[in-house]
Amino acid sequence: MKVLIVEDSAILRQRIVGLFSGLAGIAAICEAQDAQEAFLAVRELHPDVMTLDIQLRTGNGVDVLKQVKRQLRAPIVIMLTNHSSPLYRRKCKDAGADFFLDKTTEFGELKYLMQRLLDGSFRQDRTP
């Protein structure tokens, strides 16, 4: 499985890489800190899963989500953000987010969720 981490904080990107590095089944982990890097990485890597923050250095995670989900074989997107109000949750769900985690209260669930995706517990029909 190929994973893309889109997060403006270098420290948090490294924490997520550390969480995922020990999981069997991850073939590649790529990182992006803004919308432009995210779009480039999606085109080049074709990730199966991406974590995506709403607030980026440049651009907006919700806009990235909308663009990515328009692709024929869009990745599973896990929104991971501090902007976790019901308004943002609804906005992200409407834009196609598969999962939504609050960095402050649900960060610990990220590794568990990724493991479930890797072992097929949340497998989705990915056919075009």
Image (cartoon, grey):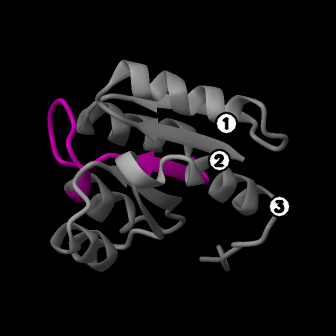
Disc 1 packing (10 Å; few <14; some 14–19; many ≥20): many
Query: Among all residues in the image, which is located at the extreme front?
Result: 105
Name the residue nearer the viewer: 115 or 64. Answer: 115
Instruction: Give whichever of discs 3 and 1 has the lower sequence position.
Output: 1
Q: Residue 112: x percent and y percent?
A: 68, 54
- From the viewer's perspective, is residue 123 above or below residue 47? below
Whether the residues at callouts 2 and 1 have beta carbons within 8 Å, the answer is yes
Q: Secondary structure at mark 1?
A: helix
In magenta stretch: residue 92: no
The amino acid on which the numbered mark 2 sits, given as a three-letter code, is Lys
Name the residue nearer the viewer: 32 or 82. Answer: 82
User: Which residue bears the numbered disc 1?
Assistant: 20
Disc 2 packing (10 Å; few <14; some 14–19; many ≥20): some
Q: Which residues are magenta?
A: 47-62
The amino acid on which the numbered mark 1 sits, given as a three-letter code, is Phe
User: Which residue bears the numbered disc 2?
Assistant: 111
Name which residue lies at 61% across and 53% down.
48
Q: Residue 103: x percent and y percent?
A: 38, 47
Name which residue lies at 67% across and 80% down.
125
Q: CA distance from mark 3 to mark 1?
A: 14 Å
Q: Residue 90: x percent and y percent?
A: 25, 77
The amino acid on which the numbered mark 3 sits, given as a three-letter code, is Asp
Residue 89 circle label: none
Name which residue lies at 34% across and 42% down.
39
Position of residue 88 in the picture relative to residue 72 (left or right): left
Q: Secondary structure at mark 2?
A: helix
In the picture, the quarter occupied by the C terminus is bottom right
User: Which residue bears the numbered disc 3?
Assistant: 119
The quadrant in which residue 87 appears is: bottom left
